[in-house]
Amino acid sequence: KAGVTQTPRYLIKTRGQQVTLSCSPISGHRSVSWYQQTPGQGLQFLFEYFSETQRNKGNFPGRFSGRQFSNSRSEMNVSTLELGDSALYLCASSLGEKGTEAFFGQGTRLTVV
Amino acid sequence: GQNIDQPTEMTATEGAIVQINCTYQTSGFNGLFWYQQHAGEAPTFLSYNVLDGLEEKGRFSSFLSRSKGYSYLLLKELQMKDSASYLCAGLNSGGYQKVTFGTGTKLQVIP
């Protein structure tokens, strides 16, 4: 079956702009989690959506938001981009039960200039 | 969330055994994952431990001690392709998929 698909793979934006990233989970998976990965900080949890509801949230400012659609596809939005938002954004899909394996997409590499 | 601590880098020889340690905050803990991430690629699942003890999966084994807040990943018969970052991640209680990752251990396997 198809894996987790993230689009776009690469993105360059200017400070102050906003960006929307997309994630299509594995068919049948209802949970989508988003992570930010930077060399110094590692993988930082942003939020998790399950059946269109945000179920968990990490410690990121309100500029970072997300949503999930009825088909489980998820989008992540970052407004008023800052240079420090440059990172690899990874999406992970799972069945959503505790401890279940998460399957990661290839990520979107965002560069803010 | 969890405070996940693991070494930044390790080097080991092809064919040898290496143990990557991970410590975490025990309060709010509900399980521990290990993921492998090759450079430029997405993390891939290796193991999930929720009970104390050792779980073996081929050349890879993962151990958990809940009372000590300690886990390790054991890699046997190292191969060059095992060169990667190994991420330890704690599952927070009450959060179905709220996972806190460590910064990862970059393992280099040398001939």
Image (cartoon, coloured by chain):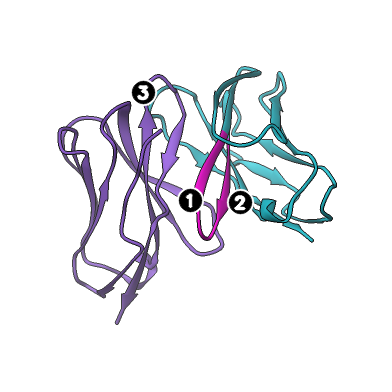
Tell me the amino acid under the disc marked 2: Gln
Q: Which residue is mark 3?
A: B93
Picture residue at 51% right of the left edge, 64% below the top:
B39
**Which label sits in the foreground, 2 or 3?**
3
Q: Where B73 falls versus B66 (above or below)?
A: below
Q: Chain of mark 1?
A: B
Q: Where B72 falls versus A46 (above or below)?
A: below
Picture residue at 61% right of the left edge, 51% below the top:
A106
Question: Dot 3 surroundings within 10 Å: few (below 14), some, or many (20 or more)?
Answer: some
Picture residue at 20% right of the left edge, 30% below the top:
B51
Q: Colour of chain A?
A: cyan
State the image quarter where residue A55 is shown.
top right
Q: CA distance from mark 2 to mark 1?
A: 9 Å
Disc 3 + disc 1, Cβ < 8 Å: no
Rendered image: mark on residue A106: 2
- The magenta stretch is A34-46
Disc 2 + disc 1, Cβ < 8 Å: no
Mark 3: secondary structure: loop
Question: Dot 1 surroundings within 10 Å: few (below 14), some, or many (20 or more)?
Answer: many
Q: CA distance from mark 3 to mark 1?
A: 22 Å
Picture coordinates of residue B85 (x, y %)?
41, 60
Mark 1: secondary structure: loop
Q: Colour of chain B?
A: purple
State the image quarter where residue B109 is shown.
bottom left
Tell me the amino acid under the disc marked 3: Ser
**Left or right of residue A71, residue B39 in this image:** left
Is residue A58 something that shows in the picture?
A: yes
Rendered image: mark on residue B43: 1
Q: CA distance from mark 2 to mark 3?
A: 28 Å
Q: Where B93 falls versus A20 (above or below)?
A: above
**Left or right of residue A64, residue B105 in this image:** left
